[in-house]
Image (spheres, rainbow, N blue to C red):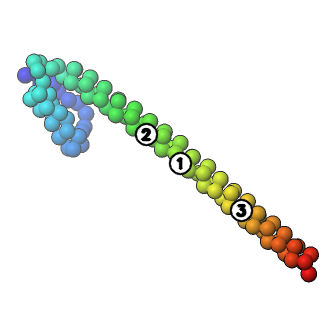
């Protein structure tokens, strides 16, 4: 099998993962898989994974925004409820004064 020189610096953990990936392709591939094909598969998978992650991040931002809007609405309704209770109490006091 032909070997290729890899330039650049990789942390040991990344180097181990790359080595495991190369061994996987050596074991599991049917026929000869070029390094180029293996890299294309990895890049494609990585792109898809990052795309899904990006969508999840966007959805999380939207959900946080919706939660914030709902909290504001609850505060608004609680404020209106307090105002209504105050009006009812005032009306009761007014009626009580009329009865006396």
Q: Secondary structure at mark 1?
A: helix
- Image: 3 above or below 69: above
Q: Where, quadrant-wise, is the N terminus in this rendering?
A: top left
Say which mark, if any, is on residue 64: 1
Q: Earlier in the sequence, mark 1 or mark 2?
A: 2
**Front disc: 3 or 2:** 3
Where is mark 3, residue-wise? 81
Mark 1 neighbour density, 10 Å: few (under 14) some (14–19) many (20 or more): few
Number of numbered discs present? 3
Residue at (73% x, 59% y) in the render: 80
Q: Earlier in the sequence, mark 1 or mark 3?
A: 1
In screen coordinates, is 64 left or right of 76?
A: left
**Residue 73 picture location, percent across and down:** 65, 53
**Residue 12 picture location, percent across and down:** 20, 44
Where is mark 2, residue-wise? 56
**Residue 45 picture location, percent across and down:** 29, 29
């Amino acid at each position: 099998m032909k070997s290729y020189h890899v330039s650049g610096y990789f942390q040991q953990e990344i180097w181990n993962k790359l080595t495991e990936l190369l061994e996987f392709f050596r074991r599991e591939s049917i026929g000869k898989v070029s390094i180029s094909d293996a890299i294309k598969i990895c890049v494609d998978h990585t792109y898809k994974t990052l795309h899904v992650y990006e969508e999840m991040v966007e959805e999380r931002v939207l959900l946080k925004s919706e939660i914030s809007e709902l909290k504001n609405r609850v505060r608004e309704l609680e404020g209106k409820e307090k105002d209504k209770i105050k009006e009812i109490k005032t009306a009761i006091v007014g009626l009580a004064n009329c009865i006396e």
